[in-house]
Image (tube, grey):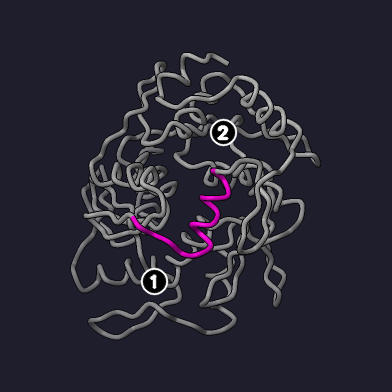
Amino acid sequence: MNTDCVLQSHKSFSEKGYQQRLQSIRNGECHYSCGVCHKSCRQNGDVKRHQCKQVGEHRYSCDVCNKLFCRVSKLKIHQRIHSGERPYSCDVCHKSFTQKAGLMTHLRIHSGERPYSCDVCHKSFTQKAGLMTHLRIHSGERPYVCDVCNQSFSQQSSLKRHHRVHSGERPYVCDVCNKSFSKQCNLKRHHRVHGGEHPYVCGVCNKSFSQQSNLKRHHRIHSGERPYSCDLCHKPFALMAALMRHLRIHSGERPYVCDVCNQSFNQRSSLKTHLRIHSGERPYVCDVCHKSYVVKAHLTRHLHIHSSECSY
């Protein structure tokens, strides 16, 4: 130990006494005990901090939000939330932090250090909290429970996201079209629609997609996989949505209703086509004679007339 550092703090310690205390800490010896609950601690300062929590003594108050603290050092750290002060800065990427501990944890990203390792699968983590959360995968512990539907989660953040299902909260909003999402990852995927980004490419036909799930569904065209089957007639489908539409044939459900004539349909696309009767819209136009149609299939049939004319 550098005794100059001790002298600069205006406190005096004997080198021998310091070394004895240091050795006791290394040995795990606990010389100090709480007079309330008899909890033992290695250092006198730890006992004082513990007793402060035990008796509920909170002498230091934040003048902004009135939150109480038992230690002035904790109050000072808390006040950085209001002031925006982040005195600890990373020398590599210049990201700043309110606490030194946050910086030290962040530096492991650059160094690659992952000191906390799982005894079961040996996966390693930069933070102890990350390891503790991971261990719940092996133990099956799910301590965070929804007070609405009793669904349980291993992480508090997962419960917080789940609550949005019940509250309808969608805090992540697209700055282009104002569409909102309950999860940030969903907003990130949505941004690809505006950016034209299609990072997922089919290895068979090179068609690209903005989402991995869309590529997975597309693969079924090539593989012929149809994993969704009707329980009534056993007809298979490549998409769950297609199965749900098919089930309306058996149930007779027709949830899409025309607000002009009240005619109902079992598919949204059928209603959309029907509405063109009322609006007069005929979007499918023949390039040869410019005759227009409400349905694309009618244009396709019409084009056979011109193709047969060309054969003579």
Looking at the image, residue 85 lies above or below residue 79: above
Q: Where 216 sits versus 261, above or below?
A: above
Q: Quadrant of residue 46?
A: top right
Separation of marks 1 and 2 at Cα, in angstroms: 38 Å
Question: Which residue is located at x 32 percent, y 59 percent?
Answer: 67
Which range is magenta? Answer: 45-59
Q: Quadrant of residue 195?
A: top left
Which label sits in the foreground, 1 or 2? 1
**Residue type at tag 2:** Cys
Query: Residue 109: horizontal and vertical position, in percent?
Result: 53, 25
Tag 1–tag 2 contact (CB < 8 Å): no
In the image, taking residue 1 as reference, residue 282 lies left or right, namely left
Identify the element where label 2 is drawn: loop
For label 2, the residue is 202
Viewer-proximal residue among 133 and 35? 35
Residue position for label 1: 167
